[in-house]
Image: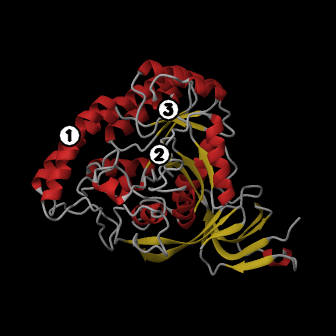
Amino acid sequence: MSGGTLFTNARLVDRDIDCPGSVLIRDGLIEAVYLGDSAALQTASAAINIVDLGGKVLMPAFIDLHAHFRDPGQEYKEDLVSASRAAAAGGYGTVVLMANTNPVISDSDAAVRVRERAASIGLVDAFQAVSLTRDFNGSDTSALASLDPAHVPVATEDGREVASAAVMLEAMRTCAVTGVIVSCHCEDPALAASARPFREAALRADAESGFPAFADRGRRGSSDFSGSGDSVPQAVRKNLAEAERLLRLAEDTMTVRNLTLAAETGCRVHIAHISTVGSLNALRHARSALLHGGGLPSITCEVTPHHLALTDTVPAIVNPPLRSRADRDALIEGIIDGTIDAIATDHAPHSLADKAAGAPGFSGIQTAFSSCYTVLVKTGRIGLSRLSALMAARPAEILGVARGLLRPGYAADLALIDPEGEWTVEPNDSSRWFSKSINTPFCGSVLSGKVLSTWHRGRKVYP
């Protein structure tokens, strides 16, 4: 047994605790947790490295149920190394990667290869999801039957949706047998296609304005990043509003369909990036029906940091789109009342050229904790333990892994946080911003809750 490390003089925070204490780690695992002013130092042998954390917050590293690392095939946007560095800087220890790479990850062998490559980098653990249909062809679900959830816990068509209800029903029936989670990108493809011309018109009007709004500009020094939208040209606002109306219908109708199929099959279903009042209410209704019918509460959901922090007054393109203040307030209420299970980044890096052409999504894994801390904890809406539950303990439960809590036997994936620390999001500073992509709506914003250090399996990986 190797010598361990004892972290002392810390504020220990996870889902269940928030108190002074110490943590002993050894061989990649948490060996002991000492709460309060215990005699932890008396247990330390000469072989143990003692690290005084100066009263800062020591938390379980975060777990992201939804990220796009673009590798293989789109490494000009992001690759496993750059994304892993950004994840570690954001306090993450585990990520679930979406399958919309090139080629599409459509079977267990391809998924395991990505996971092994991420493990060789050694900064985070990655679970690679597979597509629900082979190569996103919308019909062939045959590969799902051979999945082992211990290695491939999630299947998803994220980035698009399975258009056919019959095919989705078949996929859910198969995954109900294997125990694999079906993560649903709830968006009706035909309605989404009908919204595209309005987004393209908004981009054209934006480019013609001489002061493009889609540069993902940020706002400094506030826990409300919504902005007024006063500088956005009227033609841009009008086209974005019509696109948003259609995309709201696309999300709400497909959410109801997928929840109905989940109830029919008993499949474990996870609703990705929920963003509207309608979809949130549909989820509540489905869960209530399951519980009253004697079924298991097998439906979970996630929300992104940007849907919690921003509204449609920010003219930046993402799927689902940024919604109204009423939607954002409903999502925050869903966080407070426990309806929403997890916060997931939907980290979606793009090149500058792709973003200028209208590619949806943000680079978000490095700003996720701080933006959520700023919007939710600093404002008093929730406590830090609740945020830890949303970003660590509950995602770990959904995946069925022994992580996300400060407990003996759990992985020594840890994040050191300065809750009083502030930092300015400067994606053009490559010494502090590690994603290849600089498309962030928080550019220039001052965020609270600074990630100081991250340990993965007991090894310091950031800074």
**Where is residue 296, by image quadrant?**
top right
- The image shows residue 139 at horizontal and vertical percentages of 47, 22
**Where is residue 31, by image quadrant?**
bottom right
Residue receiving disc 2: 302
Element marked by disc 2 = strand
Q: Are there few (<14), some (14-19), or many (20+) residues within 10 Å of tag 2?
A: many
Q: How is the image coloured?
A: secondary structure
The earlier-in-sequence mark between 3 and 1 is: 3
Q: Is residue 426 left or right of residue 462?
A: left
Q: Is 38 above or below relative to 438? A: below
Q: Is residue 39 visible?
A: no
- The image shows residue 24 at horizontal and vertical percentages of 77, 68
Asked if the residues shown at circle 2 and circle 3 are in contact, with their CB atoms under 8 angstroms apart, the answer is: no
User: Mark on residue 188?
Assistant: none
Front residue of this view, candidates 176 and 129: 129
Q: Is 197 above or below relative to 85? A: above
Front residue of this view, candidates 285 and 213: 213
The amino acid type found where label 2 is placed reads: Glu
- The image shows residue 121 at horizontal and vertical percentages of 65, 59
Q: Is 312 above or below relative to 457? A: above
Element marked by disc 3 = helix
Callout in the foreground (2, 3): 3
Asked if the residues shown at circle 2 and circle 1 are in contact, with their CB atoms under 8 angstroms apart, the answer is: no
- The image shows residue 264 at horizontal and vertical percentages of 50, 20
The earlier-in-sequence mark between 2 and 1 is: 1
Q: Is residue 341 visible?
A: yes
The earlier-in-sequence mark between 2 and 3 is: 3
Residue receiving disc 3: 135
The amino acid type found where label 1 is placed reads: Pro
User: Mark on residue 197?
Assistant: 1
